[in-house]
Image (tube, helix red, strand yellow):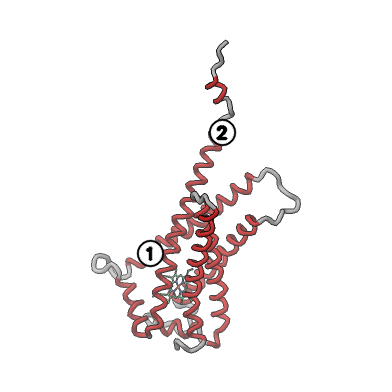
Amino acid sequence: MAVDTSTRKSAAPAPAPGKTARRRSSVALKLFMAVTGLLLVAFLYVHMIGNLKIFFGAETFDHYAHWLRTIGTPLLPEAWYLYIQRAVLTVAVVGHIVAATILARRARLARPVKYAHRPKVQGSYAARTMRWGGVIVLLFVIYHILDLTTLTLNPHGVSGEVYRNVAEDFAPGRWYVTLFYTLSIVAVGFHLRHGLWSAVRTFGLQSPRGELYARATALVLSLVLVVGYLSVPFAVLVGLVD
Ligand code: HEM
């Protein structure tokens, strides 16, 4: 009797339709996290480069801050570009957090057995670092906006005098503010390093050599950002900017 081999091949159980849809939506969420993350990294780089203009003196720095409010004019009314940027950044940050929470919940539910003593594996360590790092970065951004945008917590707090606002903020007597910024910016660096690395790994990194390059790139990009940002408060602390 002839045997239909094609039927035998397709006899393996097909994945449940619900599972396939869930896997697809998890990939979409990871893609969304990568896109919003890259947008935030682009903002971080542009903001860091802008901050370095403080080394060219008060006039240049204040002029730069004023220019930020005029981007898009006369097509857009003054400061509209800033409001659009704020809206986009807020959507990106909130979306990034929501997607991370959904993915973390799915990963937890997918674990077949709950251990009485959770093994200290590298993955869970990185996940915890990302979660707490993310919380620190979020708290920092809220403080930072109250400090240098709304000027509510700034010791100088004069709108338009951005150089003085920064210089007074990181004056040596306020070392605790510099310490808080340092810890937060290092947390930004760690978050970014792991985020970049896991985005690359999720989206098709194959070879060990590629893995090495991706790790090195993530490390360098994060280090440049941390050093660039920290150069400002430390320059004020040692009197290079006053
Ligand atoms: C020591 C490092 C930093 C300095 C000196 C600094 C400086 C400033 C200043 C002067 C402003 C107000 C700009 C203006 O009103 O013209 C500002 C706004 C802002 N900074 Fe920073 N910044 C630093 C680090 C960071 C970091 C690490 C982040 C994000 C994680 C960040 C996110 C923002 C945001 C979201 C705004 C509000 C922009 C807006 O007005 O729409 N900054 N920063």
Q: Is residue 212 left or right of residue 125?
A: left
Which label was assigned to residue 220? Answer: none
Residue 28: % across, % down = 47, 47
Residue receiving disc 1: 85
Spatial CA distance of label 1 from label 2 is: 43 Å
Where does the image place residue 152, in percent across and percent down from the top left? Answer: 47, 77
- Asked if 11 appears above or below 218 in the picture, the reply is above
The residue located at (34%, 77%) in the rendering is 64
Residue 191 spot, x, y in % from top left: 54, 63
Disc 2 secondary structure class: loop
Mark 1 touches mark 2? (CB < 8 Å): no
Q: State yes or no: Cβ of the residue under disc 1 lies below 8 Å from any atom of ligand 1.
A: yes
Residue at the image position 59 percent from the left and 52 percent from the top: 104
Q: Secondary structure at mark 1?
A: helix
The residue labelled by disc 2 is 15
- Identify residue type, mark 1: Gln
Split into quadrants, the picture shows ligand 1 in the one at bottom left
> What residue do we see at 32% from left, 66% from top?
80
The residue at the far front in this view is 209
Mark 1, other Cα within 10 Å: few <14 / some 14–19 / many ≥20: few
Specify the quadrant that holds the N terminus.
top right
Which residue appears at 34% of the width and 82% of the height? 60
Q: How many marks?
A: 2
Asked if 42 appears above or below 174 in the picture, the reply is above
Q: Type of residue at label 2?
A: Pro
Q: Assess disc 2: are there few (<14), some (14-19) or many (≥20) residues with their C-alpha within 10 Å of its C-alpha.
A: few
Question: Residue 187, position in %: x, y?
Answer: 56, 68
Instruction: Look at discs 1 and 2 and give the one toward the viewer.
Output: 2
